[in-house]
Amino acid sequence: MFRRVYLDNSATTPIDPAVVEAMLPYLMAKFGNASSIHFYGQEARAALDKARHQVAALINARPNEIVFTSGGTEANNLAIRGLIEARQSRDGDIAAKPHVITSAIEHSAVLNVCDDLEKQGVTVTYLPVYENGIVRLDDVRAAITDETILISVMAANNEIGTLQPIAEIGKLVRELKSEGKKIWFHTDAVQAAGKMPLDVEAIGCDLLSISAHKIYAPKGAGALYVRRGVRLHPQNLGGHQERERRGGTESVPNIVAFGVACELAQNELERSAAELGLLRNSFESKVGEMISDVVFNGDRGNRLPNISNISFRSIEGEGLLINLDMQGIAVSTGSACSSGSLEPSPVIRALGHEDELARGAIRFSFGRFNTVADIDQVIEMLPKAVETLRSLSPKK
Ligand SMILES: *Cc1c(COP(=O)(O)O)cnc(C)c1O
C-alpha cells in the first residue's frame, strides 16, 4: 500500500482537527464583521478578544500588545518597516541614515525587507553565523553604532533549527536603553513558537513575529507582538482595526483558529518537544549508522527538537527530494520560499560549507502528527535513494 509521510512541517503544518472544529462556526453562522455594532459584530469581536488572549498567553504578553496580521511575513514587514518609518518621521534624536543589525540566516521575510531598506538609504549589517549556525553576542555588540536603531535576529532558524541567543541580545538592548540609547529588538519567532517556551519578558524583545500555519492552524493569520509604548508606522492603511496599527477587516475564522492553536501549543509544549526530539534523534542516529558521508548541519545541541538538516555528499538535494517524493515522502531543500531555484541554500552556505555540501542539503522537519512508523518508512527508503543517486553521480 502506498503510504505518504509528511516531513515538511517547517514549511507548513497540517491543521489540527480541534482547530478546524473551533473555527467552523465562524465560517457559518458567526460571520459578522468585528467592527459592526450589532449582534453579529459583537459575536465576532468577542471571538477576536478571546483569540488575542490565547495568542498573548503563549508568549507571556498582554492582549493589547498583540497585532493580528495575515501571517509571519506581514508581521516581519510591519515590525521592521513600521519601526524604521515611525522613527524616521520623528525628528531629533534619530539618525537620518538609520542602521539595522540582522543575521545572514534570517527568513526571506526579513532579508528582503532589509534589502529593500538598503535601497532607501538604511545601512544593514548581516551578522555571520559560523559553522554551528549561531550568531555570536560579541558580534552583535561590535556591530552597534550610534545610528543603530533596530536589531532583528530570529529565535530559531527555519532550515537548520539553530536557536539564536535572543535572551542575551534582549539583555544587551535593555542595558543600552537604560543608558538612554534609542534601540529596539525584533525577533522572528515563527519557527520557535510551539516548540520551545517563548516569554517576551524573559527575552526582552520589543517586537516578536509568529504565524498560525506553522502551529497547526490555517494559512492566513499571524501576529506581531508590540511592546507597550513602541510606536510603529502602520503598513496597511485603512480602517481603525488593531488599534490603528493594521487596517483591514480581521479574518475572524483564521484568527479564532490561530488562538486555539496557540492554546493547544502551550498546553502540549513540553510533551510535544520531548516527543519530537525523540523522533528526530532516532531518525538521525539511524541515518548516521546506515548512510556514509553525511553531514548534520548546524549545532546538534542548541536547536529546535523537530528539525534535522542533513547534507549528503556527492548528490543534489533536489534529486533526492524528487526521488523521495515519488515514494510518498515529503521533505524540502532549504526553505519553501527559496525552493524552485537550484542555487545552494544561503543558510547552509553561511555555515561555511562548500557548495557541494550546500547543494546536497535536505531538511526533514517533524510535527505533531508524525509517528515512529513514519520514521521507519523513511529509514527504509532513504539509504537506497541516496545509494542510487550516488551511483549515478558524475562526481563518484
Ligand atoms: C514561515 C516563516 C515565515 C513566514 O511566515 P508566513 O506566515 O508564511 O508568511 C517567517 N519566518 C520564518 C522563520 C518562517 O519559518
Image (cartoon, grey):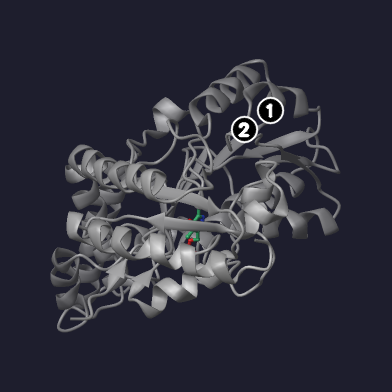
Residue at the location (41% across, 57% down)? 364
Residue at the location (43% across, 67% down)? 385
Q: Which residue is mark 2?
A: 135
Name the spot of residue 57 as percent of width and height, x first. 27, 42
Q: Secondary structure at mark 1?
A: helix
Is residue 345 visible from the viewing direction of this image? no
The crowding category of the residue bearing disc 2, from other C-alpha atoms within 10 Å (few below 14, some 14 to 19, many at least 20), is many
Residue 36 falls in which quadrant of the image? bottom left
* For the residues bearing labels 1 and 2, Cβ distance under 8 angstroms: yes
Label at residue 140? 1
Q: CA distance from mark 1 to mark 2?
A: 8 Å
Q: Secondary structure at mark 2?
A: loop
Q: Amino acid at mark 1?
A: Val
Residue 23 falls in which quadrant of the image? bottom left
Residue at the location (53% across, 69% down)? 389
Name the quarter where the N terminus is drawn: bottom left
